[in-house]
Image (cartoon, rainbow, N blue to C red):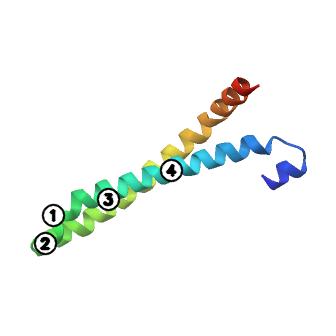
Amino acid sequence: MHNSYKAGGNWEREMFIESLGFAASAGTGILAAKAGAAALGFLAVATPVGWIGLIIGGLAVAAGGVAATTVINNLSKNNSGDLYDGIMKALN
């Protein structure tokens, strides 16, 4: 964005896109972690077999969270430019 600013580009639009992507993926990551923790919470007091399930389930929750945040980040970055343009058009 600094290079865009120096070159006289539309750095405000780029900042909006990056910020929205970060916020959306961070929110998705928080939701995925909370949902995974709730789903795995009962395994913590289980037998040794439950501990194995907790480890495997924890890895699955982590992988699912990474996948979800990546998808949401890409979707929001691809669509937030149009949102920015609409907001700017409405303000002008």
Q: Marks 2 and 1, Cα distance to the nearest angstrom?
A: 6 Å
Side of 41 relative to 32 (left or right): left
Sequence-earlier tag: 1 or 3: 1
Q: Residue at x 65, y 43 (%)?
A: 17
- Residue 61 placed where, x, y %? 33, 58
Circle 3 sits on which residue? Answer: 60
Q: Residues within 10 Å of mark 3 (few under 14, many from 20)?
A: few
Mark 4, residues whose alpha carbon is within 10 Å: few (<14), some, or many (≥20)?
many
Identify the element where label 3 is drawn: helix
Rendered position, 23 above or below 75? below
* Residue 34 found in image quarter: bottom left
Q: Nearer the viewer, residue 72 or 83?
A: 83
User: Is 28 situated above or below 92?
Assistant: below
For the residue labelled by badge 4, is the local secondary structure a helix, a strand or a loop? helix
Tell whether label 1 touches label 2 (CB within 8 Å).
yes
- How many numbered discs sit on the rendered protein? 4
The disc labelled 4 sits on which kind of residue? Ser
Q: Circles 4 and 2: CB distance less than 8 Å?
A: no
